[in-house]
Image (cartoon, helix red, strand yellow):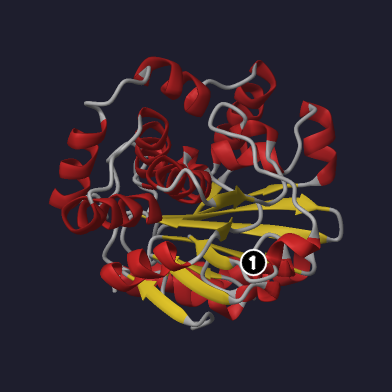
């Protein structure tokens, strides 16, 4: 699979890279990291990484803006995106050939060619594996910029190597990437430093979450709460893992009101929760998933389902 992707990259003069909406470090890391690798090894090619920019990820990179005409006869590569609805910039269909590279469950097998590895800690780890293959077969070189982006993606999706998904391959990749010339301290500051208002909201989460006797926990962050703390829904993504620090929690859900939709952020220390996410128009990893609810009444149904999952797990 990796060899075929590399051969396909060689065949096209224009390559456009997509990732998912509401990006996280792995989305930027895999998309932008692969773009940097292609630019480094094929400077004659036109390479674009597109999608709506998230200001919280400005420390990593900024996407490109392109016209529709650029898609003509272009290779499109979509990274870190499980289903077509979540692809940022739906013009991906305008390209000549589409490759999907992802580490989520392959419930939506889109594209002309797919490489999906659910055992990978992150899509950025998969891009590093692609580089390792290309280094042997096509003499690819790693740049400092690409190493920085891939390292950030791996760190982000493994929770700083704390999640069970971080395996031997993950640490091997990280060990190779840190040998390149980039400032890890500055990178970590960009990833984990928070504005005071976010820290205040984090305190609110700790003070107001609800937990039952089986370790099922939840907190509702309404529009009123967001206004009180002057925080946007996207900024709260930095806080989703916060409740994992609480002793006794088995799995938790954070509801974040965003316009007419309620974002459902599910996390777990053991019970499988991605099937629950699928039930509510979402999906993701077994221990980290997302979904959406159309009302607070539907959010309450999510809570009851999570309680049942934790009760059965105990």
Image check: 288 left or right of 1?
A: right
Above or below: residue 109 compared with residue 148 = below
Q: Residue at x 31, y 61 (%)?
A: 270
Image check: 156 left or right of 66?
A: left
Using the rendered view, name the quadrant where residue 273 is placed: bottom left
Can residue 106 be seen?
A: no
Above or below: residue 126 compared with residue 174 = below
Number of other residues with Cα within 10 Å of mark 1, as a class: few under 14, some 14 to 19, many 20 or more: some
Q: How many marks?
A: 1
Q: Residue at x 72, y 72 (%)?
A: 298
> In which quadrant of the rendered image does the C terminus lie?
bottom left
Can residue 199 be seen?
A: yes
For disc 1, the marked residue is: 86
Q: Position of residue 191 (x, y in %)?
A: 49, 28
Q: Position of residue 242 (x, y in %)?
A: 48, 37
Q: Tell which of 176 and 244 is nearer to you.
A: 176
Q: Position of residue 303 (x, y in %)?
A: 59, 65
Q: Residue at x 29, y 49 (%)?
A: 128
Q: Residue at x 36, y 73 (%)?
A: 115
Image check: 314 left or right of 58?
A: left
Using the rendered view, name the quadrant where residue 177 is placed: top left
Describe the element under mark 1 as helix, strand or loop: helix
Q: Position of residue 232 (x, y in %)?
A: 76, 37
């Amino acid at each position: 699979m990796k060899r075929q992707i590399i051969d396909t990259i060689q065949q096209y003069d224009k390559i456009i890279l997509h990732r998912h909406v509401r990006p996280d470090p792995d989305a930027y890391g895999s998309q932008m990291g692969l773009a940097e690798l292609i630019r480094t090894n094929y400077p004659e090619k036109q390479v674009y990484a597109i999608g709506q920019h998230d200001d919280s990820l400005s420390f990593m990179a900024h996407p490109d803006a392109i016209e529709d005409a650029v898609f003509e006869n272009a290779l499109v590569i979509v990274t870190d995106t499980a289903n077509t609805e979540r692809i940022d910039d739906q013009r991906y269909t305008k390209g000549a050939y589409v490759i999907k590279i992802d580490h989520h469950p392959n419930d939506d097998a889109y594209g002309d060619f797919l490489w999906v590895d659910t055992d990978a800690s992150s899509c950025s780890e998969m891009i590093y594996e692609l580089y390792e293959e290309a280094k042997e077969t096509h003499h690819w070189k790693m740049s400092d910029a690409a190493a920085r982006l891939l390292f950030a993606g791996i760190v982000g999706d493994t929770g700083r190597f704390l999640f069970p998904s971080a395996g031997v391959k993950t640490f091997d990749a990280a060990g190779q990437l840190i040998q390149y010339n980039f400032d890890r301290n500055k990178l970590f500051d960009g990833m984990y430093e928070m504005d005071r208002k976010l820290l205040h909201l984090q305190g609110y989460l700790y003070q107001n979450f609800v937990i039952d006797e089986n370790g099922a926990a939840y907190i509702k962050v309404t529009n009123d709460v967001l206004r009180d703390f002057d925080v946007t829904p996207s900024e709260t993504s930095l806080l989703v893992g916060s409740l994992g620090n609480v002793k006794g929690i088995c799995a938790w859900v954070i509801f974040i009101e965003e316009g007419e939709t309620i974002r459902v952020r599910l996390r777990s220390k053991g019970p499988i929760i991605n099937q629950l996410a699928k039930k509510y128009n979402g999906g993701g990893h077994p221990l980290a998933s997302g979904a959406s609810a159309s009302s607070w009444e539907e959010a309450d149904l999510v809570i009851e389902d999570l309680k049942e999952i934790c009760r059965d797990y105990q």
